[in-house]
Each structure stands twice: as C-alpha cells, then as structure tokens.
Image (spheres, helix red, strand yellow):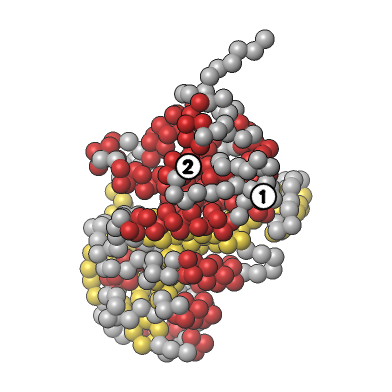
Amino acid sequence: MLGLLGDLTETHEEAQISAGDGAKALFVIPLAQMGSLNAAEQTIPSRSWRKVIGRELPSADTLARVAQRVSLDEIRDVMAAHYAKLKRNKALPAPKHGLIALVLDGHETTSTYLRHCTTCLSRRVHTAEGEREQRYHRYVAASLVGEGFHMCLDIEEIGHGEGEVVAALRLVARVHAAYPRAYDVVMGDALYAQAPFFLAVLAQGKHALAVLKNEERDLYEDAMQLCAASEPVRFERLDGRRSVEAWDLCGMTSWDSLGQPARVVRTREKGRVRRQLDGEVEETSCEWMWVTTLPAAAASVQTVVELAHGRWDIENRTFNEGANEWHLDHVYRHEPAAMRAMLLLTMLAMNVFRAFVRLNLKPALRRRYTLRHLVRLVLAEILVDTPLVATG
C-alpha cells in the first residue's frame, strides 16, 4: 500500500511519485498485503526492493513520517494517470446500455477507545464497563463501475458536525474536475435523494440516481398510488437470476425542491438461491424504489434497474474486498494526512492489481486461481528474496 512512497528524498520529507513508472506502481501491491509498516520493515533485506525501486525499502518510521507529508494531489494525479492509460487502451468499456456510473457511499474505517486525532469523530457507546467515548473516522468513497471493471477514484473525509452528503458534494466536485468524461450518472443510497445533491450533479451535466425510501415523502406516496393504478412491465435481469416486475413513472412533480420533474422506478424482484448450509433451494423476493433524472429516452426501465443494482459494487469490491484482502481499514499511523494517504494508496494498489489480472492473465488462469492467491504470488516475490539472518 505504501509503495508509491518509494522514491524518498534525501531528507525523507516528501515522496516524489512517478506516474509513468509501471514497476513502482506494482510496488504498491506487496506492501498493501503486509498489513503493517513493521511487517514491511522486516523485508528490507530483500534484494527485490532494489530491483524494483532502485534502493532499499525505508524503515517503518520513515514511511510513516513520509505518509504525513506526501502530497495527496500527487497520489490523485497517479490514479488519474492510471485511469487515462486504461482509457486510451480501451480497457474501460461501458456496459451494453452504454452508461458508466460513479457510485458514492460512506464508510467507517476505524474506531478506537485509545487514540484520537484532530479529525476524529466521537460518540458515546454503551459497553460492559459502562458508557465510553469512542473515536472513529468516516469517509465518502467514489468508484467507477463499468462493464467488468470497478475502479476506485477518490475519498473525502466526513468532518465534525457535517453529514455524508456534504462531504460527498466536495468529493463529486473534485472527481468531476479530474474525470469530467469518465461517467454518465452519479448514484448513491437513500441519503443522496436530496435536492442539493441532485442539483449539483445536474449542474455538472450528469444524471443522478438514488434509492427512494422515505415513506413520508410526497414523491414516495404519489409513486405508490400510481403503481397501484397501473400494470408493471416484466423482464429478466441480465444475469438471468431474477424475474422483475417494474413500474416506470416519468414526469413526477411531487419533489418541489428539485424544481423539475423526476422519474421514479419501482420493482418487485423474485429469484432462487441455494443455501450453503443445507443445500436447499429457497425462493426470495424483494422490492426497490429509485428516483433519477435519467430520461426514458436515455435509459430504459431495464437499464435503470441494472444501473441501480450496480451500486452494490462499491460495498462489495471497495469496502469488503478492501478490508478483507487489502487491509483498507488498518490504521498505519493515526494522523489525518497519513490516513488519507494510506487509503488512497491502498485504492491505487487495488486498481493496479485488478487491471493487471483482467488485462494480462488468460481467462483460464483467472478461472483457476482466486484473486487472493494471485496477489499472494506477487507478495511472495518479495518474501522469497528476503535472506534469513542467523542470530546469536
């Protein structure tokens, strides 16, 4: 994860990051798998580091200090350069419906009773020892979702006394400045069904889509009444696993603060799953409702449904995979700038590795080996070249 801190200056006060050096971009992957700076420090004798970065790996203390001082804009520039190269090579295709989504979601990376910093949020938690003050950090992440790829783009920390959407507005503005043509629609959960957010997205020339849940809203109530008085359209999801009944309600004017008609899509979905515990097949059903600015001419009701369900990609492939496989939630140094740098570098490692697997390995290999196995092979290149030094 800290791989792009490799070219340290003589004073170790900053990291010079080169977007064009592919080897140094891959250098980020093994460190992201080690889970701590002290674990990385134990591999300093490895001859592989000098082959990859031209020098020995710095100490854990040096890496931590540099993480506090490294320019976040430089890391973001590396991520943007990686995206631009993939885009030039036509390696980021749009789905069949032609719309690429920017997905936003909040995530809590850490919580502790012991340490805190200037940007820590706090809450009172009831424990077995009584009520205690817990410190934690929350971020909004932005990921790009297309045909067969998922790409982390940026993060924004949620500050004291502000909601997730406030931080998301800052994030969307920065992402749009860096990736103005990368996506067509911005998606979020029910928190994002707010007029300020939708209007900010529309001002960028993009469309917005969010879950609609609040049963007390006029828009929700009117949509339910119209659904009761009309027949749904029926189709199968593209993966063939669910049958869908969908109501497509265009021109809804119940959202006064939006200042323009909105479109509401409601679905009932049925499918079958085989339970892992007993192998029994069970029928499942669920209902969803979304509000969007996408016109029917630009996206059919089936397209809206496929887009909306793609929102789960950020939960599965950014947060769950990041925490379980890449130590995304680990606090390498409890300091605001260092934590942001670590998160961005971990996301870069995930992007680089996914692109490597998707574009360089044959389909037979991808089917045979898990991503966990493949990334451990990369880590093994460093560990196998670390000599054992006898003590005593």
* Residue 179 appears in the rendering: yes
- The amino acid sitting under disc 2 is Lys
Q: Which residue is drawn at 30% across and 47% down?
A: 359
State yes or no: discs 1 and 2 in contact (Cβ < 8 Å).
no
Q: Which residue is drawn at 29% across and 75% down?
A: 299
Q: In which quarter of the image is residue 167?
A: bottom right
Q: Residue at x 48, y 54 (%)?
A: 78
Q: Residue 24 carries which label?
A: 2
Q: Nearer the viewer, mark 1 or mark 2?
A: 2
Percent position of residue 257, x then y: 52, 87
Lower sequence index among marks 1 and 2: 2
The secondary structure type at the circle numbered 2 is helix
Return the residue nearer the eye: 137 or 263.
Answer: 137
Return the residue nearer the eye: 82 or 132.
Answer: 82
Q: Which residue is drawn at 42% across and 37% down?
A: 375
Percent position of residue 180, x then y: 43, 70
* Residue 189 appears in the rendering: no
Return the residue nearer the eye: 76 or 233.
Answer: 76
Return the residue nearer the eye: 17 or 315.
Answer: 17
In the displayed structure image, the side of residue 370 where residue 142 appears, left or right: right
- The amino acid sitting under disc 1 is Gln
- The Cα–Cα distance between marks 1 and 2, rounded to whole angstroms, is 20 Å
Q: Which mark is residue 68?
A: 1
Percent position of residue 4, x then y: 53, 45
